[in-house]
Image (cartoon, rainbow, N blue to C red):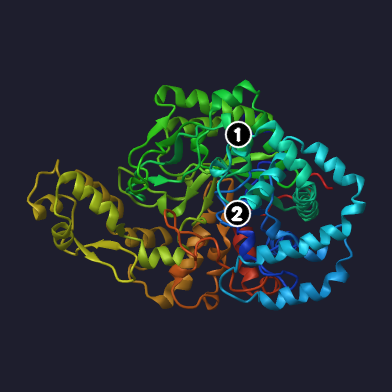
Amino acid sequence: MYEAFLESISKSKWQKFQPSRRSGVLVPLFSLYSQNSIGCGEFSDLKLLIDWCQKTKLSIIQLLPLNDTGFNFFPYDAQSTFALDSMYLSLKNIEGVDVKSFSNELEALIKKYPLNTPKVNYEIKSDKLNILWKMFESAERKLPLEFDVFLKENKFWVEDYAMFKVLKEVNQESCWEDWEPEQRNRGKDILNQVKTKYRLSIVFHQWLQWQASLQLEKVKSYAQEKDVLIMGDLPLLVSRDSADVWSYQSYFKLNYAGGAPPDMHFSNGQRWGMPPYNWDAIREHEFDYVKEKLKYAEKFYHLFRIDHAIGLFRIWSIPISEPVETEGVNGKFDPIHEMDWEAQGRELLSLIVDSTEMLPCAEDLGLVPQCSFEVLEEFGIPGMDIQRWKKDWGGSYDFSQSEGYRKNSIATLSNHDLSNLLAWWEYEAGCLDETLIQNICKKRKFDFEEVVFKLFQRESGGHEKLSWNERIISSEKIAVELGVSSLESKELEEVYLSSYQEKQKFLKLLDLKEIITKKDYSDLVKKAIKEIHRADSVFCVLSMLDWLLLDLKYFEGDYWDYRINIPGTIRPDNWSLKLPISLEQLLKLSLNSIIEDVVISADRVAPSSVIDKP
């Protein structure tokens, strides 16, 4: 069924573990915890997750980015695309340190940060760093040869990263663009002074990265023993306030901010803030930045997800002079001309495939250029197909059956930026975002409140969703109700067709009755999970939250609250959700047998011993 992958440009990657149907789980490390964790998930906890995957026949673990975010804790806005976040270090497994001598401090930390809380308390990072500094001081005079080897192998980034971290501390964590000119512009004299004056602090940050590398490399080895693949997440862009941008300023277009154009889901577009790449400058240096990044990530992952992979073809670029309030509305694509998109995407994907043994996977959501689909298929790179968005667009708008999914895709119900299945069902299915309708009204000079009164009803729940009024039984009815021409109501008719009777169409896909109540939610979840596993997609990876919905007792209150992130918002709840159970409890769940049955029934049990053992 997937023989074409062995003839694709990525064939050497597929040969490593065979192009077979697999199932997996998506979970952020910060959401996990075990009896050995302190405050949040740690690298070593992934071994228990691997055990759970082996138990349930899942064979892919997809993680969110593990890069150092400083103290902002936005995984996709990291201070480095190389460095790992020291927050995830297991303090009980630090190499070359007498950990027992710190037992009292570790116990105090465990008491201060109880694990059974719904959200991560990110103050844990500062407290961990304080103890790690003391551990480092106890070991600094007898650092092993392996540490020097680590520094030599990672010379491209690790020294600059460590100096960046020290200068951030010296400058009270301010952005590097606000530092003194000598520091900002990396003057040779000032850098030499920093190396001398803050030698020990620089070595400390390098030592943290060595420790993190050791711990995560052991996780990859353990996964290989258990025939589980680890999928890392390598964001395309990096924070403007990062070691990468400070170290290689010419590699970035600092007059622009990356984002996404307006679409149905984000009617004002998005402005992420990270600078787009200056590919011409990177090309002049033989793409060293890309190659080194992949070389380092390969130590930890078997596959990797390219976040916003369509940005390899073209990136939505917003002038930094543009007011923040306009979000992503006033941007432009880079390259400007569509004729150049495919050539750039081909060049960069060829570079990526040739520079690593990992299999690339592409997050190709949003407004995707047609050339992206064609190139990903030719390269044998899986994209993303999400059940709620897989429809017969422009036709019946029915949900896609299994054959409607690309073979070169990862099928899923949701991801970290989306609501879980039941939150979607309760608040989003069949509904539209108020901001989307406001923008359509603004464009057409309609009175928004009048349009809402005539066409919609506001949904309860406080999530700014609109559902269609019962009397709007056809798209033609919209023009009649508003007293306008069909040309003027075109955009409203288009969103009508995409959302009207969406719940009924979803139930039809699952072969469920048209009226469903909360007591039927278990059937809805089971059938949706079984249906997505039928997809022709080579991989099917569900979020841990969607897997846990197989037993609703683990969810208290509003399903909407069980989500990782709401894009386009800055909320204290973003990037902080913990799972409602520990990893030890996860291993004992009765629903594990249900998951195993789903995987077996869908013929997604991966062949054993197809990846090299450590």
Q: Residue at x 32, y 58 (%)?
A: 502
Disc 1: which residue:
185
Looking at the rendered structure, which numbered label has been put on residue 268?
none
> Three-letter amino acid code at disc 1?
Asn
Note whether 431 is above or below 100 in the view shown.
above
Q: Secondary structure at mark 1?
A: loop
Q: Residue at x 57, y 53 (%)?
A: 75
> Three-letter amino acid code at disc 2?
Gln
Q: Secondary structure at mark 2?
A: loop
Q: Quadrant of residue 395?
A: top left
Depth check, front residue: 385 or 248:
248
Disc 2: which residue:
172
In the figure, is residue 426 to the left or right of 590? left
- Report the label total: 2
Taking the view exactly as shown, the residue that stands out farthest to the left is 483
- Residue 196 in the image: state x and y as whole percent: 78, 42
- Quick check: can you spot residue 452? yes
- Residue 566 in the image: state x and y as whole percent: 45, 58
Depth check, front residue: 222 or 228:
222
Q: Earlier in the sequence, mark 2 or mark 1?
A: 2
- Quick check: can you spot residue 298? no
Label 2 crowd (10 A; few <14 / some 14-19 / many >=20): few
Note whether 121 is above or below 138 in the view shown.
below
